[in-house]
Structures are given as structure tokens and as C-alpha cells.
Amino acid sequence: MALLEIRNVSRRFGDFTAVDNVSLSIEAGEFFTLLGPSGCGKTTLLRMIAGFDLPDEGQILLDGVDLVGTAPERRPVHTVFQSYALFPHMTVAGNIAFPLKMANTPPAEIKAKVAAALDDVRLGGFATRYPHELSGGQRQRVAIARALVTHPKVLLLDEPLSALDAKLREQMQIELINLQKEVGITFIYVTHDQGEALALSHRIAVMNRGNVEQLDEPDRIYSFPRNRFVADFIGTCNLYDGKIESVNTESMTLALAGFGAVRIAKVEGVDAGGVGLLALRPEKIRISAADVDAVGENSFKGVVKELLYLGDVTVYVVETVGGALVKTLLANSGAGRIRFFEVGDAVSVAWHVDAGHFLHE
Amino acid sequence: MNSLPKRSRSLGRWLISGPPLLYLLLFFVLPCLIMVLASFRSPGDYGGLAPLIDETGKPDLSLDNYTRFATDFIYTKVFLKSLGYALTTTVSCLVMAYPLAMLIAHSPKKYRDLLLLLVILPFWSNFLIRVYAWMIILGPQSALSRGLNFLLGLFGIEPVTLLFSGFAVIVGLVYVHLPFMVLPLYANLEKHDPALLDAAQDLGANAWQRFWRVTFPLSLPGVFAGAALVFIPALGIFAVSDILGGTGGIMIGNVIKQQFLETRDWPFGSVLSIVLTAAALLVAGLAAWVARPRRESHA
Amino acid sequence: MRSRSTSRSTWLWAASIAVYAFLYIPLLIVILYSFNDSKLNAEWVGFTFDWYRKLFHNREMIEAAGNSLGIALVASFCSTVLGTMAGFAMHKYQGKLLQLLVLTPIAIPEILMGVSLLLFFVMLNMTLGLVSITFAHIAFCLGFVAIVVRSRLSGMDESLTEAARDCGATPWQAFRLVTLPLIMPGVIAGALMAFTLSIDDFVITFFTAGANASTLPLQIYSMIKIAVTPEVNAISTLLMGLTLLLIVIASKLSPNVLRS
């Protein structure tokens, strides 16, 4: 049985539905992320798990027991707040000792456990400092130590890295992954940063307007988005409306506006005449000088319309002869060479038949 | 917070708000209601209140006291005079407080708190002391009085008594209430964007125009807040007029005190109090309405 | 600071200094004449401590001072407790009724409270005296404390109380161990303010004191009306010193207490 089960949970604020009949199962020991834009309901859901809000409908079961009647202080669930919420009038040691005191741990044990917790987050000598004396990253680690010191069953993290700068954030992401592996506790992570979600999670629930759009492992969400919203929200994606023209044994042919006939891998459950979206990730499209054809690929000629130099890669926007816009990436692997193609160059874009993902909504 | 079962949530709420609520209901609301009731009753034989139920067993209630207020013009006159004094005080305070508030708002940050403290400090001395000080200054023996009368004498004008007059009362009122005008004005002026004045200057406005067309209109919420904080207390004052006013500077507060402690016609005193409360609440409501948050139509 | 024409600045400075002078000269005169060796507050005759000495032998004055102090201590304690509860409730529950009841006594002229409380106490057949004064003082000090506490609470990070609950604290523990220590400077500032208001109060005390009880302001008032001597100046100077001390303490604890 799953550790945490969310069954048909809804939460409304007046006319606004923050969480709309959401059901999820979260396994013990997994790093689970709720991902979505602001207002999608992820934080509301997190607060209901923590106990700071009650669902209007539905149940939240931890180890099979409904949490609804339990006050937040009695749930074996701890939160790392977005603002860290460290008590300014207590030292670092005082902060970390607080949950132990609330649990009536004997004073001798408290000292030992606080020291161990500080070591776990590599803040060994900081016990007597006050929160205002610490940097952002250090405060964050104290917040995590405080939340973990009583070994909760679930750790909730509410956009904990959003206040850190990019370099520090990357560092902390790696630390969080390692910490979770070490400690083995279930993490439920909330973020709006899709890159972060992809990097950290075992599974991601993509949320939009109170609903879960897709629940899957990161690579599957990335490669096989279930609908336009997910395709758009995760990474960059080329999306084209298309209609199925014919179905063969291994593949199907689509009529795509601006391209013509495009071959894709066969998808179950649709027949000729069905409409849908073709999702193509830019890195799966090859850009080359015109006149390169290959077997097993869709290839179209076009002209470079725009380009964006990003240092490690260049993004090219190519306009096909048919008028469609294709975003594609090319790594700048040639030392010293900045661009392979210039605006106006005649090029050819090609992708493998299996590279595209057909969504029928 | 929606995190506890409904029952204990309400219990917590009542435990916390209960005691202060009860105290205020008992020692503020109830006395006010009693006063309203008293305004309909008759004065007792030795002053105070006559019994509620008279000898015939009927409640002794009437509109007599209100009629008296409406018909006996002398009371309305005092009331209007008090309104006049309060208004004069408010305008004087505004004129005096404005430059001060502007100065503090434009001072470097580190001096602002000190300058504000200097404004508030006199306020924290005892109210009576502040009034008493003016008794000294305006008294007939003081340097000011004698100097003034000497000057007047040069022109052949009769000596004036500064003390025990409407003038003295207003000076006292202004003195006592000045900090109340400075603070809200300052709070408002502090928030003004200096770039607005630069823009106005850039577009050709001179100093006076910049003040009158940019600063002053933007400061109106502060002006009204200060005005309310001065006008309402000033309206109901009696100590200042009692000490400085003599017979020439009687305000409605003095009449109320007279009714309650000397004439002992409590019902009528209650009527006067109710009229005063109504006026105060009216002004307070007006001030709140003017100061309500609204969309900024000017940048 | 941007440049402004110097003549405007000078004008502003001049006007401001005039206003500051207006504020302080009367008080300085009072202080000055407390040392004046003359019964009349008219001309400077000579320096003396006589009036202060007379003050300390003035039994009525000392009794009044003692009363004022006692009342202020009790009233400030009670109004701080009630006011903190009110401020907390106002912040957390935003109830309209409580807000109205707490703020109205501060908004209306004092004489109205004085008079209505007089009626109230008489109807209860209660003898007017120190007790009635104390009840009255608590009623109007409560609001001030509530405002100070509430503004302190709104400046506090909400997530701290949630974090405390998250760490296993009951609502009461969260209040006692996290919220209260953090708002304590505000609570103390409120208490000092209540104390000052109580010691200084004249109008409400005037109506609820009855014939026998006397507080310092009432004593000063009768001295002003009946027999003005520089003893009044002396007691005024002492009171000013005391209040100054309390303000300094209060502002050290809660730098923004002035703003509320």
C-alpha cells in the first residue's frame, strides 16, 4: 500500500477551485514533486497534507489512516517553509531542538540528536549562531535539519530553493538528492521550476488549475507529454496540429500543416481521420545544410528565420517551405566557432520517425 | 486557519476575544446605553436622575430634554461656538504643522526619528501642565501681556486681557493638539515620490505651483487624517477652556461638565453629550470616508 | 537629495524652528519658574529649591502621587493583559465587533467616556473612588495597547507560528514559545504607554473620582484653579522628567512605537 494516499481531494475558496478532485498515491522513500505554475493548487495541496488547511472533500490517508481529524502538530509530517521560518529569537541549536522539546525528548538525548542533525547538513560548528547571522543557503540547511530531526514519515518542501541564486541552487539540488537517498524519507517537493523537478524527482505530478495533468517519471513526462499543457510547460516543445491520414503496421502518416506528410510511430487507439498534436523536442531535430536526406527520417527544407546564441547551444528557428516554424538546437561544439548557420541560410531539418510524440486529447 | 475541528476553533476564538470584549461591553457600551436612556429621563430632586419608574408605576420617559436643547437657543449657540473653535484650531494646526512635517519628511533619514521625537516629547508631558504654561504666558503679569499692552498703549488703544478669552482657548487648543496634526501629515509626506516634483519642475512649474498642484493634493489623505485627530478631541475639550477661557471661552464640554457636576441635571447633560457624540462620529465617519482607499487617478 | 532653491529651504527651516519654539518655550518657562524665588509666575527674582521642598511636605500632593502610581500600575497591568488579547484577536480573527469596540473609545472625545462612566457607576450604587478610576482607566488604555500589539503582530512573519505547529507545538505552546517572545517588545511598549496615559489622565479621572479620591492631575488642577503657586511648576517639571524617562525606555524596546 502506498505511504500517502490522496483520494478525491477538493478545496475551494469561494468561487475559486484551488484543488479539483485530485487523487494521488505516493510511495515510501520516493522523491515526489508537485509541479505547476502559480495558482495551480500545488501549495494548497501541500498545506492540506501538512494540516494547515482542511480539504472540503476527500481524504488524505497516511499509512491507511485519514489525517483529517489530526492537528498539524500531531502529524508525522514536517515542512520546510519557503521562507525557512527559522525562529529568530533562538539559536540554530535552539531551532533544531524545538521539535525534540515538543516531543518531550529527554534533555541529554536532545543535545546528541541536535549535534547529529547539524552534522548531517554539514553545519557542525554553527550551533550557537542565530538565524540572522547565517547565509541563505545555511538557513535553508538549518530548516531542513529542524524538519528531519524527529524522523517524520514525510518531509514537505515548499519551493525551498526559490530564494537562492542559480549557482547555489544547483549545488543545493545535488545535496537534496543525496540527502534524500541517505535518509530514505519520502520527500514531497513543490516547485514551479520544471528543470528542478526533472532533476530531483522520482516521479512528478504536473498540476494545472487544480487538476493533475500527468503523473509519471521525469523522462516519460518529458518524452511523452500527455497533453498540450504538459508539452508546453516542460522544456521547450514544438507543437503542431495534425490529422491522421493512414495507418500502417509499424507507423502512421500525419498531414501536418506547413509540412505535408509526416511519419510517426504507430499509436494505439486512433484511426485514420483522428486529429491531435505532434510534439517534437528541439534537440531531437537535426539541422543541416540543405539536401541531406536519410532513410527512416522526416526531412523538410527551409530557411533560418531567427537564431539565439546561448553559449553552449544555439537555438535556430527555421521556417519550412510550407510555412511552419521549427525550433531546433545545435550544440556549439566547434571550438571558437560561434554559429554554424546564419539568418537566411537554406537548411534542412530532419527527425527520426520515433522522435515525435502524438497527443490525441 | 482551517486546521482544527470547528468546535475547538470557536472555543479558542472566544477565549481570546472574550475577556476584552466583555470588559468593553461592560465599561464602554453599557455606560453609553445608560447615557442614552438617561437622556429620556427626568432629573432627580437633589440632582442626578429621578427614579425610572415613578410613583404611578409608569416609566418616566420623555423627549423633554431634547426639546429643551432644540428650543433653548443658548445651547445650540455654545455648540456652534465649539465647532468654530475646533475648526479654527484645526486650520491653525494645519498651517503650523505643514512646514514642520515637510521639513522632517525631507530630512536625511537619520535625523527624522529625532525630529519626530522632538515633536512628540511635549505631548508626553502632562496635559494640564501644557495648558498651565499658557496661563503663565498669557497672564496679565507676563512679559508678553505687558509688552503687548505697552505697544497698544502707544497707539492709544485700551489694554487687552489675553487670558480668559476665546483667543487664549484657541491658543491652548492648538498647543495641545499640534502633534496630532504633524504625525499623520508626516506619515503621508514621507511616502511622496521625489521624482514627481522633479518632473513638475522639468515641465516648468515654479516652487509654489509645485507645492500647490503636486504636493498638497497628494497630501490630502494625511491632511484629513490629522484634521480628524485634531477636530474631534478639540470639540469635546473642557479643561483647556476651563482653565484658559474664563467666561469668555465656554465650550460645549464646559456646559456638559456644569450639567453633570454643578447643576446636576444629568438627563440634560446626557442630551448634550449625545449631540456631541453624534457630531464626533459624523466627523469621524466623514474622515474615514474621505480617507478610504481609492484608485490613484494621478500618478 | 535633489536640489531645491535655497530660499525655499531657508523658509522651511525658519517656519519649522518657529513651530518647535512654540512647542518648547512654554514648557521651558514652566520649568524655569519652578526655580523662581517668587510666588508669582511673573518675573524672575532668584534661584531657589523652595518650591520643591514645599512639594515634598505637601501631604495631599504625596497622597495624590501615591494614588496615581497605584492606579497606573494596576490599570497598566490589566489593560496590557486585556489589550494584548484584543490585539491578538484583532489580528487573527479580524472581527468587526472587537475592532469597533476597541477603537471607538480612542476616537471619541474623552469627556463622553467620563460622563457615561459616571452615570454607570452611580446606577450601580458604587462609591466613586480609586476603584472606579481604575476601572475607567483600564477601559481606555486597553485600546492603545491593542493597537500597538496588533501592529507588532502584523509585522511578524506568519509562517513562524505555522513552523512551530509543524514542529509539534500545540497552538498554546506556539503562542507561548514563539509568538509571545517576538511581540514582547511591543507588549512592553504598550504597557509603558498605558502607564503613562493612566498617570497623566485628567478628564476621565475628573468625572469618576468622586469627592474624595485624588490623583496627581486632579491635584494639579485644583491647585491651578484655586491657588496657583510655583509648586505646580515644580510637580510639572518632575512629571515631565518621569515621562521622558518612560518614553526613552519604550522607544529602546520598540523603535516603531512612535509610529502607531
Image (cartoon, coloured by chain):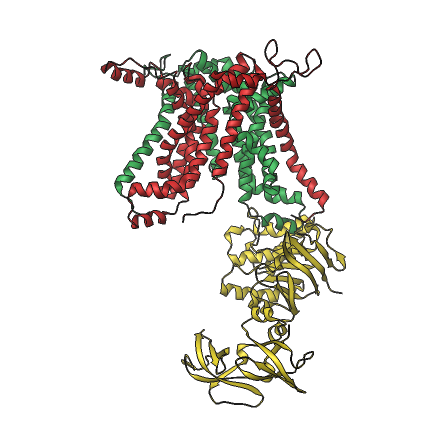
Identify which residue is drawn at 57% across, 70% down: A234
Q: Nearer the viewer, residue A273 or B143?
A: A273
Identify which residue is drawn at 52% across, 19% down: B70
Q: Nearer the viewer, residue B93 or C90?
A: B93
Identify which residue is drawn at 55% across, 29% down: C105
Q: From the viewer's perspective, tell me whether residue C232 is left or right of residue B67.
A: left
Chain B rendered in what hue?
Answer: red
Q: Is residue B229 above or below residue A173?
A: above
Q: Nearer the viewer, residue B264 or C252?
A: B264
Q: Is residue A92 visible?
A: yes
Q: From the viewer's perspective, tell me whether residue B198 is left or right of residue A63.
A: left
Chain A rendered in what hue?
Answer: yellow
Q: Position of residue B191 (x, y in %)?
A: 42, 44
Q: Is residue B101 above or below residue A92?
A: above
Q: Which chain is green?
A: C
Identity of the residue furthest to the top in this view: B45
Identify which residue is drawn at 35% across, 31% down: C20
Q: Position of residue A357 (x, y in %)?
A: 61, 78
Q: Is residue C244 visible?
A: no
Q: Is residue A314 above or below residue B180?
A: below
Q: Position of residue A8 (x, y in %)?
A: 72, 60
